[in-house]
Image (cartoon, rainbow, N blue to C red):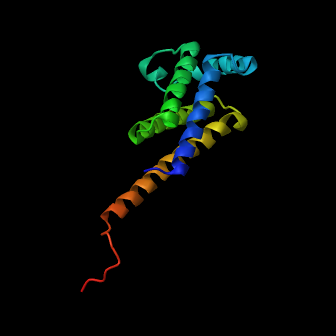
Amino acid sequence: MNSPVLRTVSVLLGTFFIFVGVFKISSVVSKELHKDLRKEYVKYASFFPLAQTLNFKVPSKWYRRTIGVLEIVFGTALAFFPNHKVKNAANTVLLLLTVMAMYTHYMVADRFSRTAPAIVFFFLLVGRLGIFYQLQKREQRLKQQPISNGIKQD
């Protein structure tokens, strides 16, 4: 499966998540954005999905850094690894992180402008998986069709 559309979407999405992950763990690119993220993650950490279940308070610094590292690692896998199984696993993990981000934005009652990127990238990640499975299905159909060489058989 060597689709230019799938390859382009994978590289663009992976690069986006690498970029966002760098913002979360470092102030090298933008000090203001990094400072804002640090402040916001104090609120986000209190709504970590397993915090109440496990009776565990997640330190906001480590929550932000963990999410950032996961985005960088799986964004790199999505963008640059040639194996489709690895890419799909990375896509799934990034999809889960995005769902968790949408949940967190909802719980802290963030403005729509803060929630919108998570929603958009949720649909892009779902779309990438949809493209992959459509191409895979088409490839399987083509393999099952008998090869015709133009000779009429009686």
Residue drawn at (42%, 50%) of the image: 1
Seen in the picture, residue 31 relative to 11 is either above or below; the reply is: above
Question: To which quarter of the image does residue 19 belong?
Answer: top right
Q: Is residue 90 visible?
A: yes
Question: To which quarter of the image does residue 33 belong?
Answer: top right
Q: Residue 83's spot in the image, x, y percent?
A: 41, 39
Q: Is residue 96 visible?
A: no
Q: Residue 45's spot in the image, x, y percent?
A: 57, 20
Tell which of 134 and 37 is nearer to you: 134
Tell which of 106 and 93 is nearer to you: 93
Residue drawn at (54%, 28%) of the image: 71
Judged left or right of residue 68, residue 137 is left
Seen in the picture, residue 67 relative to 84 is either above or below; the reply is: above
Q: Residue furthest right?
A: 32
Residue drawn at (69%, 33%) of the image: 114
Q: Residue 132's spot in the image, x, y percent?
A: 46, 50
Seen in the picture, residue 106 relative to 58 is either above or below; the reply is: below
Q: Residue 128's spot in the image, x, y percent?
A: 52, 47
